[in-house]
Every structure is written in C-alpha cells, then in structure tokens.
Image (cartoon, rainbow, N blue to C red):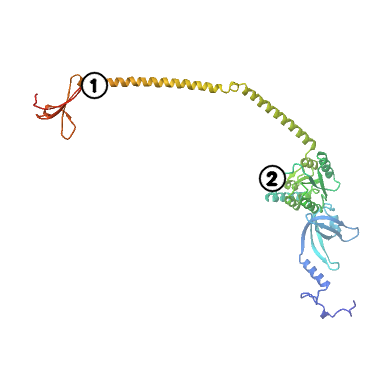
Amino acid sequence: MTSAQRPPAQQRPTGSGASSPEQPWPVRTVSAKVAGWIDRLGSIWVEGQITQINARPGTRTAFLVLRDPSADMSLSVTCSPQLLHNSPVPLTEGSRVVMFGKLSFYTGRGTVSLRVTEIRAVGIGELLARIERLRALLAAEGLFDPRLKRPLPFLPGTIGLITGRASAAEKDVVSVAHRRWPAVAIAVRNTAVQGPTAVPQIVEALKDLDANPEVDVIILARGGGSVEDLLPFSDEALCRAIVACTTPVVSAIGHEPDSPLSDHVADLRAATPTDAAKRVVPDAVAEAALVSELRDRSAAALRSWVKRESHLIEQLRTRPVMASPLLAIDRRAEEVERLQAAGRRDVGRLIDSESRTVEHLRARLTTLGPAATLARGYAVVQRIIADGDPEVLRSVEDAPPGTQIRVRLADGAVRAAVMGREK
C-alpha cells in the first residue's frame, strides 16, 4: 500500500480508546500494547528444565526451550552463547536450571521470549533438599498414612503397567507375571520415565488406566538411575495423581536403595520391577501346591477326628450302662423300696414310742385326777348359786345353815341343805 492509498491520519485509530467493528485496532497497535504489558513484568527468576539447546558457532544468540517438569508448558529462551560456555556446570538437555532475565515480545513475529542474563544449574544437594521439603509437606497432609493404603487383589484379572518403551522393567514384569500366572492380562502404557515430558505422560497414563474398570492394579515400574533420572517420580503432581487413583498402585522405581516419593504415596512399594510382579501376581504352581497341601492336611485332620470320635463311641458302647440301660433304674427302684421300708419302720417305731408316752401320761392324769380321789371315798361339796355355776366349798364359813349344796361322789351327786356347822 502506497502512501496515497493509506487513510488519513485523523481517520486511523490512535489506540487510546476501545476498539469496535467500525474502528478496529491495527496489528501494530495490539502488538505494541502486548509488548508494553509484558515489559511491565520486569526481570524475573524462572526455574525449569532445558529440553532444547540451539547454539550455532559464530552466532551471537543461543536459543533454548525451558519446560515445566510438572506440566506440558514451555517457554522460549534466548541468551548469549557465552553464558552456556562459561557455566561452571555443563548445561545439556535435561538439566534443571534457574534463569534470570526479562520477557520480551517481538512485534515482528508476534512471539514471546525470555532474554536471560544469568543461568544457574540446580545442584544435586538443592534437588534433594526440595524433595525433602516436599516429603515433609505430603507427610503433614497425611498422604503417607498407612490407613489410606488400598489392599491388592488376590488374583488380578488385568494389570496396568506404566513403564518405558522396550525397557528392561517392562520385560521383567511381563515375563515374571506370565510365568507365575499365564492367564493374567497386562495393559502396558509406554511413557517417558525421565526428562521433562515424563511427569505429564505418566499422569495421563495413570488417569487412563484408573478409568478402565477391567484394570485391578497398576504397576509403576522403572529401572535404576541417578538422582536426576528419578526426579519425575518425586514430583508433587505425580504423587497427588497416585493418591487420587481409585485403583491400587504399586511403585517399583529403581532398586532397593532408591526411595522416590512415589514409593511412599503408593499403596505398595516394591524393591524392583521383578519384585512388583511377584507381589502382585500369585504363583500358580505354588498356589496349586499349597491347595494340595491344605487338602491333604484337611483330609488327615478329618480322618484323625473321625478316628478319635469312633474310639470315644466304642468306649461309650462298652460301658455297663449301655449294655443294660434299665439296670440303673432297677437299682434305683430297689433303693427306693428299701428307703420306703426303712421310713415305715421308723415311723412305726416313732408312733409306738409316742403312744406309750401318751399312755403313761394318761395313767398319771388318772391317778392325780378328781375321779380317782372320789373313787377312794372322797367327795366334792359345792355350793349352789341361784344364777351361776356351783362353787366348791373351801371353808365352813361359806356355807351357813340352810345353804343348798351339791355333793359329788364317785358314782354320781346328791343335793342337800346345810343343817349346821361344826369346827
């Protein structure tokens, strides 16, 4: 477009107001505004992992790609090649670094790049310190609590396996699992097990296998390696993804001395991938032998019990009471009859004794009673009272002349009147 074809300056928007379909902003205005907004961020420190280095000889600018180890995000970086050459620690693809620089927006290409002036490699000591801080954080949240561990199925139908492509860990798990239980199915998900893309791929594979209802257990397997190689398995995002799984997860990372954080949040820690396969899949031959042994032991125990109970029954049958069941009843009947006879004798003797006692008392009463006295010639004199029972005369003073009296004798009584009194 020539200068004659361009619209007058007063007709072009200045960018100071809001855009509209009638007055849109041109690309240069938008680019300028974006560049201004980014420029306000100032200089910053950024941490990440170098995934690409492009430093051609004779050029004044080196191009790098800095990636977030826990997310699928990256940032373009530019710097002087001298920064890479003069670094105390050789910087290669996969190195964890901290960079200091300022973001720039290139209006010509519409891209954002971080122009750095300082690069610091993150050492092993710092990485281990960060892992320990994350370990303390996860432990404080209770993610290492044994009560959260899910039990493994006794006989899994399908095993989910997350490991590197064509790795020794995959071969070990598959061969050992099929040797122990040929019918077991294994769903393999090959992912990166080190480097900047490992965590996003492993997390995606975990979600995929966890969503599969046929998968009964998931094995996360990797062979041994350096601290830097095993860093993805101590990543916070991966640890939280393991805890979020509803399917039991077995962590088989490295060898016995290695202890990434995934071992602590998983439901089971295996020393090696081979050990994981042994602990997840039961040995068919060993289980069959165990079943056979238990069957033999059960049969032997049953035979011993039957023999013992038969012997007890034989002992019971040889007892006299079993030979003659009514003998005890007859003996008890005889004893009852004997006790009855003894009771009758005792009662008879008691009655006879008491009868004799009564006779003796009767004889004494007869001897001492008034009838016996009357029989010996004595009489009982009673005064007759008009309105009462006769009273026994005890003194001549009680019977003045003319008093009606009753004289009781042995064979009857006579009535008389007092003619006089004598003393």
Secondary structure under badge 1?
helix
**Closer to the camera in the image, 375 or 270:** 375
Q: Residues within 10 Å of mark 2 (few under 14, many from 20)?
A: few
Q: In this view, does 353 lie to the left or right of 368?
A: right
Q: In this view, does 283 lie to the left or right of 353?
A: right
Q: Is residue 170 left or right of residue 369?
A: right
Image coordinates for residue 87, horizontal then vertical, percent? 83, 54
Furthest-right residue in this view: 58
Residue in the image at 31% along x and 22% along y? 358
Image coordinates for residue 42, horizontal then vertical, percent? 76, 64
Quarter in which the C terminus is drawn = top left
- Residue 151 location, quadrant: top right
Q: Tell me if residue 81 comes above or below residue 321 in the rendering.
A: below
Q: Tell me if residue 12 comes above or below residue 259 in the rendering.
A: below
Callout 1, which amino acid? Leu
Whether residue 49 is visible: yes
Q: Distance between the residues labelled 2 and 1?
A: 107 Å
For disc 2, the marked residue is 146
Whether residue 224 is visible: no
Callout 2, which amino acid? Pro
Image coordinates for residue 317, horizontal then vertical, percent? 62, 23
Counting every numbered tag in the picture gives 2
Residue in the image at 33% along x and 19% along y? 356
Q: Which of marks 2 and 1 is nearer the N terminus?
A: 2
For disc 1, the marked residue is 368
Secondary structure under badge 2?
helix
**Closer to the camera in the image, 305 or 345:** 345
Residue in the image at 66% along x and 25% along y? 310
Q: Are marks 2 and 1 in contact (CB under 8 Å)?
A: no
